[in-house]
Image: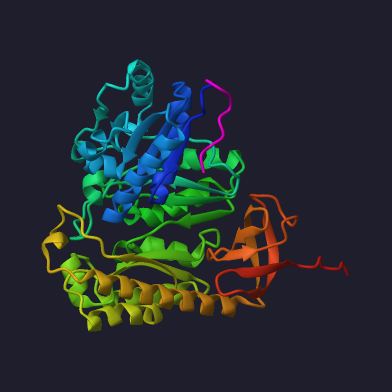
């Protein structure tokens, strides 16, 4: 719904719309900090996603809706879709400026925008500031203080990707893989803990590639140990999506030995058929994915797995698709992100024989149904257990394995860690009851 005006002719506050991944959520907070410091008010920034053609379509719809709601605001478009297709957004009459993924992380960009947007008239063409992302070799360091509630914060440790999966446009929106030095990561984590956060999520485009561009031997597992050792007051550390084929021995050791590393891994699996994986240019086989989950479960029996899966990739037959359905059981997946295949011009998969749209839609629906059943089964198995819940907002929290839990709204404020007994489930969430205090002997 349109925002209520603060008053006739009065400037409207800065508004940022985040689309897509957790890395975008982190970067939106960096942009908010830069934009507010530059005095960029009465502006709307749309941080777009390009992972599918549908995501780009939604971005254009959002821009048009926001222009109707904020007819006098300056509209700035950034993110992966803006990086990959700047002309598309520059040609939109609703857009005042388009900035790239590297530029959006720099404070000087917003000071420049503040000056240039103030001089724009309706007749002016959009200002485009999108440079060659493939030439970027460093990840911009930014210290941020908050994400709204004091529960969970995202922290960037890496950006970009050196792999070329045939369905993916993101490397061209994010550039080459590059890592944030460990010392800067620790300083950011300490700052977030001092601000009151109880959980930090390590995020990036390909976080299991962490450290490959840095001097020294530290990789993701070593970084996890480094953070936990140097930030002893951090109660919870969580990983975002990982590519399991890159998981190093140190990471597996940390999963087994570090109770503050949360037992939840979201895997980039994409398919359960070896031929489709090969055509996707993935670097693992189906058997290797199953073996990884079995190994981690032996190391950490309470672990819960999520996964990205694509339905209807080019050349996928019904038999191949059933391999993805079976993978849910074979890997013991509980949380699915299902993507109907979306043709992205400029990717090798776009030139492959396409699956009919109706079949893609039907397979995605079946895979989602499989995911709902898997989640319901996992949640049912938690009933009767005691666990610690991080309250994210009144009445809602998450377990260490990332399951949502309904709790009494007055039980804990956002950011509090509370112990509960799981009393039931509705198939999509758990219901937690506070544990009775123990009597002293």
* Relative vertical location of residue 120 with respect to residue 33 in this rendering, above or below: above
- Residue 373's place in the image compared with 179, above or below, is below
Is most of the magenta stretch helix, strand or loop?
A: loop
Q: Which of 368/221 is in front?
A: 368
Q: Kindly indicate the quadrant of the structure image that contains residue 288.
A: bottom left
| Above or below, 438 relative to 231 | below
Q: 4 or 74: nearer the eye?
A: 4
Q: Which residues are magenta?
A: 1-9
Residue 348: x %, y % from top left: 13, 59
Which residue sits at x=47%, y=42%?
186
> Which residue in the rendered view is the most extreme toward the right?
441
- In the rendered image, residue 305, in percent from the top left (x then y), is placed at 44, 70
Is residue 175 visible in the rendered image? The answer is: no
Can residue 72 be seen at all in this image of the molecule? yes
Query: Would you identify the image quadrant in which residue 400 lies?
Result: bottom right
127 or 413: nearer the viewer: 127
How many numbered markers are drawn? Answer: 0
The verdict on residue 4 being magenta is yes
Quadrant where the image shows the C terminus: bottom right
Q: Residue at x 21, y 33 (%)?
A: 131
Residue 7 part of the magenta-drawn span: yes
Is residue 377 shown left or right of residue 156? right
Place of residue 349 in the rendered image (x, y in percent of width and height, measured from the top left): 16, 62
Q: How is the image coloured?
A: rainbow
State the image coordinates of residue 301 (x, y, percent, origin top left).
Answer: 51, 75
Residue sitting at x 48%, y 48%: 227
């Amino acid at each position: 719904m349109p925002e209520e005006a603060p008053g006739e002719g009065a400037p409207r506050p800065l508004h940022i719309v985040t689309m897509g991944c957790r890395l975008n959520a982190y970067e939106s907070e960096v942009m908010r900090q830069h934009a507010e410091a530059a005095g960029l008010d009465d502006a709307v920034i749309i941080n777009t996603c390009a992972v599918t053609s549908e995501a780009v379509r939604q971005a254009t719809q959002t821009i048009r809706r926001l222009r109707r709601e904020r007819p006098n605001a300056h509209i700035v478009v950034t993110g992966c879709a803006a990086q990959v297709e700047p002309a598309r957004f520059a040609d939109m009459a609703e857009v005042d400026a388009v900035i790239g993924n590297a530029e959006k992380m720099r404070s000087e960009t917003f000071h420049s925008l503040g000056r240039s947007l103030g001089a724009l008239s309706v007749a002016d063409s959009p200002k485009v500031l999108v440079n060659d992302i493939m030439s970027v070799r460093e990840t911009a360091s930014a210290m941020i203080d908050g994400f709204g509630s004091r529960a969970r914060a995202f922290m960037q440790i890496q950006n970009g990707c050196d792999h070329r999966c045939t369905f993916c446009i993101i490397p061209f929106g994010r550039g080459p893989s590059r890592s944030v030095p460990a010392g800067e990561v620790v300083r950011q984590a300490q700052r977030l803990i001092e601000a009151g956060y109880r959980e930090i999520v390590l995020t990036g485009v390909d976080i299991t590639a962490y450290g490959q561009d840095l001097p020294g031997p530290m990789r993701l597992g070593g970084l996890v140990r480094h953070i936990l050792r140097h930030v002893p007051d951090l109660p919870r550390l969580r990983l975002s999506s990982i590519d399991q084929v890159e998981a190093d021995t140190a990471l597996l050791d940390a999963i087994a030995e570090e109770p503050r590393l949360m037992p939840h891994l979201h895997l980039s699996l994409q398919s359960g058929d070896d031929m489709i994986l090969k055509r996707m240019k993935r670097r693992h086989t189906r058997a290797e994915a199953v073996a990884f989950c079995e190994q981690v479960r032996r190391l950490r029996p309470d672990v819960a797995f999520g996964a990205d899966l694509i339905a209807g990739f080019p050349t996928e037959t019904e038999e191949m698709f059933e391999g993805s359905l079976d993978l849910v059981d074979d890997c013991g997946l509980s949380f699915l992100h299902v993507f109907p295949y979306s043709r992205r011009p400029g990717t090798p998969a776009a030139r492959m024989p396409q699956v009919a749209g109706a079949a893609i839609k039907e397979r995605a629906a079946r895979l989602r149904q499989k995911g709902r059943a898997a989640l319901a089964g996992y949640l049912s198995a938690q009933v009767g257990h005691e666990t610690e819940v991080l309250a994210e907002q009144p009445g809602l929290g998450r377990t260490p394995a990332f399951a949502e839990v309904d709790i009494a709204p007055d039980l804990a404020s956002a950011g509090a860690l509370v112990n509960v007994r799981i009393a039931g489930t509705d198939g999509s969430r758990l219901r937690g009851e506070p544990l009775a205090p123990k009597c002293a002997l």
